[in-house]
Image (cartoon, grey):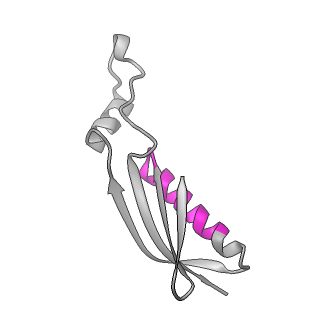
């Protein structure tokens, strides 16, 4: 999910959250591209800030990806679609 907010001087911020940092970034960049494409312009990233807001440290999730618990806990995931966030500031340019 991404939310684009206009700012002065043809600048925008977009906030995106997802289960992985890469996916959050992908959604944010996609929103920036779509915003500028509507204006027949291209986007230029001015700043990017990542946050992690998951229940458990991200390294625990990565360990569970490689070595999942056996038995009734197999398939357990502690991730949610809002674990990783990115705030991107961009400008549309010709």
Q: Is residue 16 magenta?
A: no
| Range shown magenta | 18-34
Quarter assignment of residue 71? top left
In the image, farthest residue toward the top: 71
Question: Is residue 63 rendered to the left or right of residue 81?
Answer: left
Q: What secondary structure prevails in the magenta region?
A: helix
Residue 52, percent across and down?
A: 32, 52
Question: Is residue 54 rendered to the left or right of residue 94?
Answer: left
What is the count of numbered marks? 0
Q: Is residue 71 above or below residue 61?
A: above
Residue 50, percent across and down?
A: 36, 61
Question: Is residue 56 rendered to the left or right of residue 4?
Answer: left
In the picture, which quadrant includes the C terminus? Answer: bottom right
Residue lying at 43% horizontally and 65% vertically, measured from the top left:
87
Q: Is residue 58 above or below residue 66?
A: below
Q: Is residue 2 above or below residue 63?
A: below
Q: Is residue 21 magenta?
A: yes
Q: Is residue 67 above or below residue 82?
A: above
- In front of the other: 1 or 19: 1
Residue lying at 48% horizontally and 57% vertically, measured from the top left:
16
Quarter assignment of residue 92? bottom right
Residue 24, percent across and down?
A: 48, 54
Residue 72, percent across and down?
A: 36, 11
Quarter assignment of residue 40? bottom right
């Amino acid at each position: 999910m991404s939310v684009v907010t206009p700012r002065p001087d043809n600048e925008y911020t977009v906030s995106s959250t997802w289960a992985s940092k890469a996916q959050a970034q992908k959604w944010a960049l996609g929103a920036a591209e779509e915003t500028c494409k509507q204006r027949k312009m291209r986007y230029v990233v001015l700043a990017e800030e990542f946050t992690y807001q998951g229940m458990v440290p991200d390294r625990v999730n990565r360990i569970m990806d490689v070595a999942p618990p056996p038995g009734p806990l197999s398939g357990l995931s502690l991730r949610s679609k809002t674990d990783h966030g990115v705030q991107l500031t961009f400008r549309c340019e010709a």
